[in-house]
Amino acid sequence: MKNVIVGQSGGPTAVINSSLLGVYKTAKDRGADTVYGMVHGIKGLLDRDIADLSERFKTDLDMDLLKRTPSSFLGSCRYKLPDIEGNEAVYEKIFAVLNELDICAFFYIGGNDSMDTIMRLTDYGERINSPVRFVGIPKTIDNDLALTDHTPGFGSAAKYIASTVKEIIRDGLVYDYPVVSVIEIMGRNAGWLTAASALAKGEDCEGVDDIYLPERAFDIDKFLAHTGGLLKENRSLVIAVSEGIKTADGRYVCELSEHVDYTDAFGHKQLAGTARYLARRIAERYKVKTRAIELSSLQRCAGHIQSRIDVTEAYNCGGAGVKAAFEGKSGIVVTLKRVSDDPYMCITETADVHKIANIEKKVPDGWITEDGTNVTRELVHYIFPLIQAEITPLWVNGLPRHIRLHKKNTGK
């Protein structure tokens, strides 16, 4: 049996290392001689920055810590492979390294941009008749991958958001004067994560007052008028907004007051400042105390509040990817198919990477209320099973214990 290689790419999640563990354990169980890890994704492969994972995962405790450790154990990158035409040298270098390491299967754990990498490597591999099989393992807190019910990483981020929103609501209600908290939530052009704030509502919590998703055009004047109406009836407001909400002319709201300079290799602008802008406009209009709360990277690195469902599915996706590759499949992405809501059950399938790469899955319009200020019960029902149960961190000296890579470069 030959060797396999795995990498992690894009923004990390609280359970991305469970997928890594699923790849590692399944590959070893199926007879792979060596499981290599690309340090910082495809860029690490180009730089020959590669680790032998068996040197790090020597005990059951190491592997148990791995699934409890958030963020990308191998490191990540946002490196976009160029078009094949005119850039064959880049691909020749990649495949030369794969050949030197005697790689039979390449696994990449990531979201839309990572699946673009799998697609390009698949296409070049077919052109040169390479025996290497390429498989994408889904990951993104944004939940915006096509052809899968949801993505590993989303459930834990949703659990963190719903829990944190409940606490923010409790905090805002302690005063006898108006306080408006505007919470900015990740997700870019898809509103799945922001919608998770709706899960805070229950018999012990009033819930958020408004939810604004990027699937609907955002009107600042209507927003301020609606907020003013709520202030007449409530002493405290909590409003959840997606970082990616846009005005009708296509501008991100965060760009209305701040110039966004940073754009990554895939053309994604850095989105930040939406909550600050809206909180300032509310304060100016209504002379009330406001708070702008950016959950930022906290949403994707909260390993202390992982969803057990999410951890399990992330692991299963890694294992399913290895199984598919060892059965001869290539140019595919592992997907999740929901087969039951009560009891909740998902199975793994695979889909052609060309039907997933660079396609954003948005929140269906019917799952947003008619006035665009909240989400429907159907959307809450969809998310709710994904946040269930927990995995307890291994506490040492009062803090969760993590595992980190002490890399040994194997590049030649």
Image (spheres, rainbow, N blue to C red):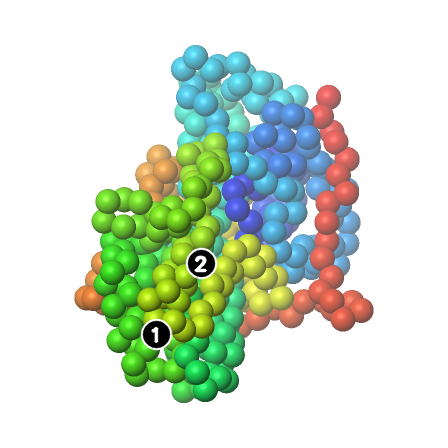
Of badges 1 and 2, nearer the viewer stands 2
Asked whether the beta carbons under mark 1 and mark 2 sit within 8 Å of each other, the answer is: no
Tell me where residue 71 appears, x and y as whole percent: 61, 51
Would residue 242 be found to the left or right of residue 93 on screen? left
Q: Nearer the viewer, residue 338 or 360?
A: 360
Residue located 52% across and 56% down the image: 296
Callout 1: 10 Å neighbours few (<14), some, many (20+)?
some
Q: Quadrant location of residue 179?
A: bottom left
Q: Is residue 1 above or below residue 188?
A: above
**Which residue has dot 2 on it?**
276
Q: Quadrant location of residue 281?
A: bottom left
**Which residue has dot 1 on it?**
209
User: Which quadrant does the N terminus fall into?
Assistant: top right
| Residue farthest left in this picture | 370
Residue located 26% across and 70% down the image: 226
Amino acid under disc 2: Arg
Amino acid under disc 1: Asp
Would residue 320 be found to the left or right of residue 99 on screen? left
Residue located 52% across and 19% down the image: 91
**Label disc, if present, on residue 93 of the rendered structure:** none
Q: Nearer the viewer, residue 289 or 35?
A: 289
Tell me where residue 135 appears, x and y as whole percent: 48, 38
Q: Nearer the viewer, residue 387 or 375?
A: 375
Callout 2: 10 Å neighbours few (<14), some, many (20+)?
some
Tell me where residue 13 appears, x and y as whole percent: 55, 53
Q: Is residue 173 above or below residue 108?
A: below
Residue 248 seen in render:
yes
User: Which quadrant does the C terminus fall into?
Assistant: top right
Q: Is residue 85 above or below residue 227?
A: above
Q: CA distance from mark 1 to mark 2?
A: 18 Å
Residue located 39% across and 49% down the image: 257
